[in-house]
Image (cartoon, rainbow, N blue to C red):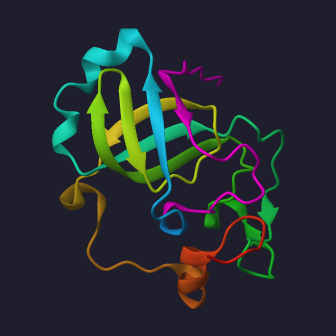
Amino acid sequence: MAIEFNSIGTIHSPFTDPQGTPIQPAGATGIEGTVEVFPEFVPGLADLDGFSHVILIYHFHRSTDFDLQVTPYLDTRLRGVFATRAPKRPNPIGLSVVRLLEVSGNTLHIEGVDILDGSPLLDIKPYVPDFNAPGQVSTGWLVDVEDRVRRRRSDGRFR
């Protein structure tokens, strides 16, 4: 079944190339960006300014293909793409939880940006710990590399 989405805005960040982009928001502490919401969707921003964090759902617009088996940045073993956060996916959809600094007109000022500049925004959802953060969790193969995830960028450099 074909599914079609329309962009509701554009994400702006200092990152124009995947090389050097943090691989997760946890590695993007202090990095600010903006989200430009298209005028026809601005009424949907009402009451969002009371939330400290939002979930951005976006299109990996520079991803051209996918692999079902990938070697993650922080690992040396081949893993199933669905056990990773790799951008090359059958449906190139990204999800990032970012800090909401301010809502100004049609612009969201955000921090913790791990997103390429110009990424098409598909949706915004408020981050609500009671809804989004389950109690006990297991992080599979990532349990051994959690500290490196916070510090590594896609070019292999550590912060």
Could you tell me which residue is drawn at 28 percent across and 33 percent down? 103
Q: Quadrant of residue 10?
A: top right
The spot of residue 81 in percent (x, y) is: 71, 61
The spot of residue 109 in percent (x, y) is: 38, 39
Could you tell me which residue is drawn at 54 percent across and 21 percent down? 7
Nearer the observer, 23 or 28:
28
Q: Quadrant of the C terminus?
A: bottom right
Could you tell me which residue is drawn at 46 percent across and 26 percent down? 36
Nearer the observer, 51 or 13:
13
Q: Residue furthest bottom?
A: 144
The spot of residue 14 in percent (x, y) is: 62, 46
Q: Quadrant of residue 120?
A: top right
Nearer the observer, 127 or 91:
127
Could you tell me which residue is drawn at 16 percent across and 31 percent down? 47
Q: Tell whether 102 sits left or right of 115.
A: left
Q: Residue furthest top?
A: 40
Q: Which span is picked out in magenta?
A: 1-25
Q: Quadrant of residue 50?
A: top left
Numbered label tally: 0
Taking 53 as reference, is 60 above or below it?
Answer: above
Taking 133 as reference, is 114 above or below it?
Answer: above
Residue 23 is inside the magenta segment: yes
Q: Tell whether 136 sits left or right of 130.
A: right
The majority secondary structure of the magenta stretch comes to loop
Q: Quadrant of the N terminus?
A: top right
Taking 44 as reference, is 13 above or below it?
Answer: below
Q: Tell whether 12 sits left or right of 62.
A: left
Q: Tell whether 6 sits left or right of 124.
A: right
The spot of residue 67 in percent (x, y) is: 82, 54
